[in-house]
Image (spheres, rainbow, N blue to C red):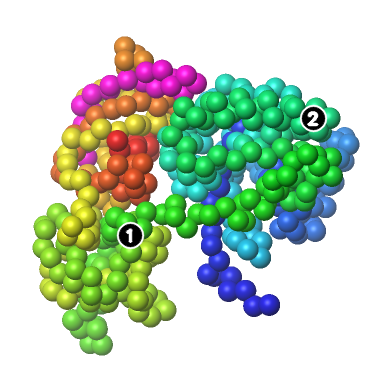
Amino acid sequence: MTNNYTNMELLRFTTAGSVDDGKSTLIGRLLYDSKSIFEDQYEAIEASSKRKGDATVNLALLTDGLRAEREQGITIDVAYRYFATPKRKFIIADTPGHIQYTRNMVTGASTANLAIILVDARLGIQEQTHRHTIIATLLGIPHIVFCINKMDLVDYAEEVYEQIKADLEAFTSKLNVVDVRFVPISALHGDNVVHESANMPWYKGGTLLYLLENIHIGSDHNHIDCRFPVQWVIRPQSDEYHDFRGYAGRVASGVFKPGDEVVVLPSGFASRIKSIETMDGPLDEAFSPMSVVMTLEDDIDVSRGDMIVRENNQPQVGQDIDLMVCWLNDKPLVPNGKYAVKHTTNDVRCIIKEVKYKLDINTLHRHEDDKQIDMNDIARIKIRTTKPLLYDRYERNRETGSLILIDEATNETVGAGMIL
């Protein structure tokens, strides 16, 4: 069987849950049971588990790469793992469960198609479950899978699973979630992770891996709004390509084809796409998230930060922008402070015009009188940029609807923003 590996669909997913809910064990189990780790890796964690006196091989050690994590048995940074099955390629962002690492979850989840949120079957829904579900919906993750873990510790009882599932359905019905799934598992013993569980014959849904391999993600990308932020203008200046002028970048959304009538923003000049080039030759069409070089039929002045769009479907253009921001820095947000902004391929500066409210991540309550925005806080703010941005609402387009705020003095990324 020949499998064109490069053309396989890629699913990015993130895992979240309270501390000790078993996220790292679940990922270790996924990697081990889907035969995605090497024998020597398994032997190393087997030896490490024996040294610690663990009764079973501790699969969590596969993902807890930082030494401090291995010693404490917790995850403190975002750990990315890559694996593949014959059906799909996967990138896992394993994010920490502690309250003080909200920003890590935002970082890990910002590009994910799917979020796996673990719930301890003995404890049911916790404050962190609310928190992680709200963050996942705020970040526009289209698919959420709740794994009710540690079913072995409640004797694989169907009524325990059904009660937690009912509680979660009641909670998620208040949120803007497109697709919610539930799987009862035991990450420690491998029930319903890669292989069906003989201990839960009452569960008729597929295993977690079956779900990850088969969930439909083709429509997650926005194929309607054509947006191509120009990253680089290519002028080879060689004899062979003397007159070549191409615009390199990554398609943010939509589908582009040679012959399409397009408009270059902010200038507003119209042209047609002459060709779409790649390292492997010309293409008949380009769509998100492909990186390509476009050439236009007319010689228009185009530079980095400009955007190629369709005439009858254009982004919003503005300098006064409302956004939800997750604060990532230990220095609090400064009202009326000046920050650098990175939005698609555009670099501008901005001033914080107003802090409207701080969001309570556990209750969704808006604190309008509390304007102190510290690390891990999520708030609604208004900024004014030095020049207009070409943007869409985040819930419509995650690529053109997101931006980051940067402290100009230290060059640190201090905030991740989602445009409203």
Is 121 situated left or right of 129 in this image?
A: right
* Residue 417 seen in the current view: yes
Q: Are marks 1 and 2 in contact (CB under 8 Å)?
A: no
Q: Residue furthest bottom?
A: 240
Closest to the observer, 212 or 402: 212
The answer to whether residue 57 is magenta is no
Name the front one of labels 1 and 2: 2
Closest to the observer, 391 or 344: 391
Q: Quadrant of residue 139?
A: top left
Tell me the crowding category of disc 1: few under 14, some 14 to 19, or many 20 or more residues within 10 angstroms, Cα based.
Answer: some
Task: Pick whichever of labels 1 and 2 is earlier in the sequence.
Answer: 2
> Residue at horizontal 58%, vertical 70%?
5
> Residue at horizontal 36%, vertical 76%?
283
* Residue 234 seen in the current view: no
Up-down relation of residue 270 to residue 217 (above or below): below
Give amino acid for label 1.
Answer: Gly
Up-down relation of residue 374 to residue 34 (above or below): above
Q: Secondary structure at mark 1?
A: loop
Q: Secondary structure at mark 2?
A: loop
Is 231 situated left or right of 31 in this image?
A: left
Tell me the distance, in whole angstroms, between the alpha carbons under discs 1 and 2: 46 Å
Up-down relation of residue 308 to residue 355 (above or below): below
The secondary structure that dominates the magenta segment is: strand
Q: Which residues are magenta?
A: 349-366
Q: Which mark is residue 254?
A: 1
Q: What percent of the width, then of the height, locates residue 225?
A: 29, 55
| Residue occupied by mark 2 | 157
Q: What percent of the width, then of the height, locates residue 268?
A: 11, 58
Total labels drawn = 2
> Residue at horizontal 43%, vertical 41%?
140
Tell me the crowding category of disc 2: few under 14, some 14 to 19, or many 20 or more residues within 10 angstroms, Cα based.
Answer: some
Give amino acid for label 2.
Answer: Ala
